[in-house]
Amino acid sequence: GQVIGTVAYLSPEQVQGQSLGAASDVYSAGVLLYELLTGETPFSGGSPVETALSRLTQDVPAPSEIIDGVPPEIDDLVLRACQRAPEDRYADGSEFLAAVRQTAAELQLPAFRVPVPADSAVQHALAGSSFTDRLAWDDEAMSTRAVTLDPEAGAHEAGDTAETRYGAADQAHETSETALVDPYGDYSQEADQVYNQWAEPAQPQGYGQAPGYAEPQHYAAAPSGYPAQQSAGYPAPEHRPAPPPAPTKKLSNRSTIKGLLWTAIITALVIAIALGGWWLTSGRYGQIPSVVGLDREAAVVKVEEAGFVSQVDEQFSDDHPAKEVMGTDPPFGERAPKGSQVSVLVSLGAPTVPIPGETDTAETYSAKLTSRTLVAEIGEEVYSDDAEKGTVAEVSPSPGSEVRTGSTVTIHVSRGPKPVRVPGVEGQKLDRAKKTLESAGLKVGKTIKEFDPDADPNTVLRTTPSKGTEVPSKSEVTIVVNNATEVPDITGLSKSEAIAELRDAGLDPVDDGEVFDEDVSGGDVASQSPEAGTVVDPSRDTQVKFKVSNAESVPFVLGMRAEKAREKLADAGFEVEVSGPEDGLVWSQSPNTGRKAQRGDTVRISTF
């Protein structure tokens, strides 16, 4: 492609068409310093293209290799400024200038003014120009042009060399010319005319003394090892051809005011351009400070004091504990525009595997892993009684585990609860049936009661879903229980005990009176209806009638006075009939002692 600039001073990255920075200007300045020391530029090819490409494969030589008396410190200045890699040069012009000043101080170089050359390209360019309305910079050597570079180009056309174009005398200065050159074409006739004019110069005409001209001054001798300064007048080198004949019209300054105005404008523009160039290439940049070892707040303050806008960026790290400041982005030592954003990097420590939420899917959980620098891997789906179908059931490594950054975490999505078959619990007591269902991974839902006279009371008649049905684990199962009640046996129990027994069975006790039963003690239940063992429907009839025995044992009264015997028999519920003296002793009784008799019956006693 085309590169605009003076070929002799192009940096390698400019030749390659890369982005340019302050280091590119440092390279050009280093070439200029080389030229000031040696009187020539470091690279000279057969064409501008060859000259430009030579710096891609060759290093700028040390000035001391070209001329004698150059100290090593000066060599170091040039060589570092002209390194092919931008990062190996001085960072910008400020750093280069500081190095030059330090070297001058170390070598104790005296201050001296650079004299104006008597035979310069500027002088030739201004020959015949008029300082009326504009300055005429029409000489080809003073122009900046676009040079077409083709790194793959081979040799040029036969005879197309610097020597054939410019002549041997100007070959050494060819690379210093800024010109639009076609590396594969011929020069125009106008260029040939210029060359012929310079090849056979006429005798120069006299020049008038320019306004403000002063005789050249003489300065202190150059430092030891350096060439002596030229004497007043500064004659041109012998190898350079004489300038072309001056035009018939000499230089003049027709308008002093206009010239001063132009001078002021040009000076202001130069200052503005210089300040703008300094600001764009160096002034607006600052160096990123080091914050390693500081705490979070101190690191933020240091970045802001350096002229940048700070923000805290927390990142996971395997090498730095949590809350430790790891550095900045851009990193320490780099240069960035002041006012730009610089991140203070604070460690979060090593990442841990996050705990899946109840509603986390593989996608949402993967996002959590990514935020912790971890990589998600989808594993096989698994049954889970706790995680709903489609949500994350398990992860490996386990949640909460500390892992290295970039580790892989396997995600297992739930297929829902594992299916189970409803076990058969018919005929089991209700409590036992509940335990059987829960052991199978099911939940007992409703319990429905139904009457079945042919099944045992309080046993399971059936379930819903029925036995053998496959359902998800933790599904609810409805149990149908037989609510039939078996009438308990209450005969022989006291009246109070019988009532309590019936009520505990969910039945309604009914006292149906007394009955004589000499086999049952008086006051105890002698009979019941329904009989013991009968199964009844508690939703229809729960009454159980019972009769209490009124049979009593005849007490022993023999040998007692008739009056005492009468009293004892009456207490037992019997009537008394006395045969004999009322105050006599009882010598017989009927019924006899220990026999059963119905309360209210008559007991006959005989006395004497």
Image (tube, rainbow, N blue to C red):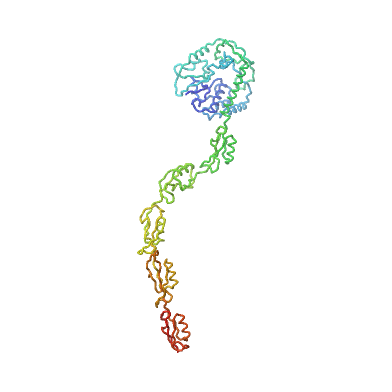
Q: Quadrant of the C terminus?
A: bottom left
Q: Provide residue 142's location: percent of width, then percent of height.
A: 54, 18
Q: Residue at x 63, y 23 (%)?
A: 111
Name the residue: 45% across, 46% down.
Answer: 360
Q: Is residue 423 left or right of residue 168?
A: left
Q: Is residue 354 above or below residue 221?
A: below
Say which of 134 and 603 sits in front. 603
State whether residue 557 appears in this view: yes
On screen, residue 111 versus residue 15, left or right, reads right
Between 210 and 557, the one lying in front of the other is: 557
Give the image location of residue 292, x and y in percent. 56, 39
Q: Position of residue 188 (x, y in %)?
A: 48, 15
32 or 15: nearer the eye? 15
- Inspect this view and state whether residue 46 appears: no
Q: Using the image, determine if residue 349 lies above or below residue 240.
A: below
Q: How many marks?
A: 0
What x and y, as percent, mark residue 337?
56, 32
**82 versus 444 height, above or below:** above
